[in-house]
Amino acid sequence: MFKSIVSIRERFSPQLRKVAVNTSWLFADRILRMGVGLFVGVWVARYLGPEQYGLYNYAIAFVSLFSAFATLGLDSIVVRDLVRYPACRDEILGTTFVLKLIGGLFTLLLTVGIISLLRPNETLTHWLVGITAVGTLFQAFDAIDFWFQSQTQSKYTVYAKSTAFLLITVVKVILIWMQAPLIAFACTGLAETIIGAVCLIVVYQANRYTLGVWQLQLQRSKQLLKESWSLILSGLTVYVYSKIDQVMLGSMLIKQSELGFYAVAVRLSEVFDFLPMILSISVLPKLTEIRQRDYKEYINKFQSYFDLMLILWLLVAIPVSLLAPFIVNCLYGESYTKSAHILSIYVWAQFGSNLGIARSGFLLLEGKQIFSLYLSASGAVLNVVLNLFLIPKYGAMGATIATLITYFLVIVAIIFFVNELKIISKILLRSFNLPHAIIRFLEVVK
């Protein structure tokens, strides 16, 4: 047995083994955050109650709407450049740090200014948004994370950010025990970002690098911004697409408890969102390789990929929808009973995540990423319009219905009317023939 294990190890190149180990670190980090985060998040939600929990999530969602200005769409571009030009490390990291710092400052001023205009007499909301937005300044230190990503050494980022996460988790439990006010929990989010930044600096220097040699290069900054502007726009539309419902719920309704009920349903629905993401990371490189040698086989494999995404969606949606009352009451208690009805319907919208990721992968490999921007922008507009009509009348359930309609029209319906996307519509129709999709899936497993 030992010899067979060694033989298997020898089949993989050192680089491939390095990628596998790196992925396992990221996977372990997601599992840790999902498990511990869900447990403590439930505890915090029960302690705060629907009203305060709703206001807390409103502040987070509001800042998230503008976070594209903090990230500046630089992440993947910077990692790419660090791989291509490792000798320019200090110039790239220094320029990235300054750009993201400026982006964070802009996000802070923008969010505080807008919330002051929208809700002029709500001092607590101003503080919650302001404290949350300050955290975007410290995201500038994610430049260190980009370096470790480029070196396939994400374990150091996991060390840093998991340390911060676990420390703040303990602090949250202490705050609940002390019966702390809502503002204290907003401060924990900021503290986690700061501690995470400090830990990143520590692991960076422990690897014999230093921040002191970082340098800002104006030509480099112009080049980065020239490439990233479309990603900033795309990121903005994606955040509007995915977060505007919570912001509109918090803005249009007097009772913040409606947002509290809705936030719980969304959080429970998205617990398994990491699965299609990890599947995408594993599958797309292989599909890229197959496309280069056999396009017919590539389409067949993409069919299996869509089949798997659809089956994965149903495996989550069906039991969660049926067991929603039990899940909500068991985790959050009777005060969140209304979330159960929302969850039983909202969880079906997760096809937007599964099939949307699969479709985005296809557009990426076919060089048609511009359609992702068009589709997310149209989804953002549609979601806003639907929420304007449905939230005043139906509250949180109105936002749920708006999400379902938006995802169906943007993820499914629209691809039948765009010539460049017709091939995806054929693949999707075959996947919706569930018995055949299951048979194809079982054949691939064999």
Image (tube, rainbow, N blue to C red):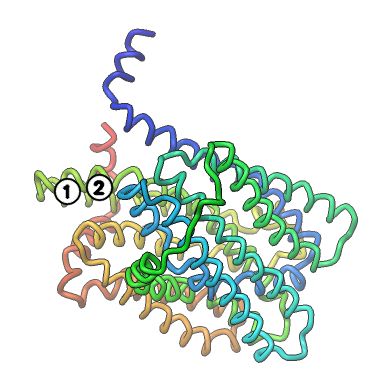
Q: Where residue 94 appears, x then y in whole percent? A: 48, 58
Badge 1: residue crowd in 10 Å (few <14, some 14–19, many ≥20): few
* Amino acid on which the number 2 mark rests in the picture: Ser
Badge 2 vs badge 1, beta-carbon distance below 8 Å: yes
Q: Where residue 29 appears, x then y in whole percent? A: 55, 42
Identify the element where label 1 is drawn: helix
Q: Residue at x 46, y 44 (%)?
A: 148
Task: Give the residue number, with chain letter if any, for mark 2.
Answer: 304
Q: Is residue 382 left or right of residue 395?
A: left
Q: Nearer the viewer, residue 169 or 130?
A: 130
Q: Quadrant of residue 63?
A: bottom right
Q: Where residue 401 appears, x then y in whole percent? A: 50, 76
* In the depicted structure, whether residue 363 falls above or below residue 161: below
Q: Quadrant of residue 419?
A: bottom left
* In the depicted structure, whether residue 434 falls above or below residue 395: above
Q: Nearer the viewer, residue 203 or 123?
A: 203
Q: Is residue 351 left or right of residue 135?
A: left
Q: Quadrant of the N terminus?
A: top left
Task: Give the residue number, with chain letter if any, for mark 1.
Answer: 300
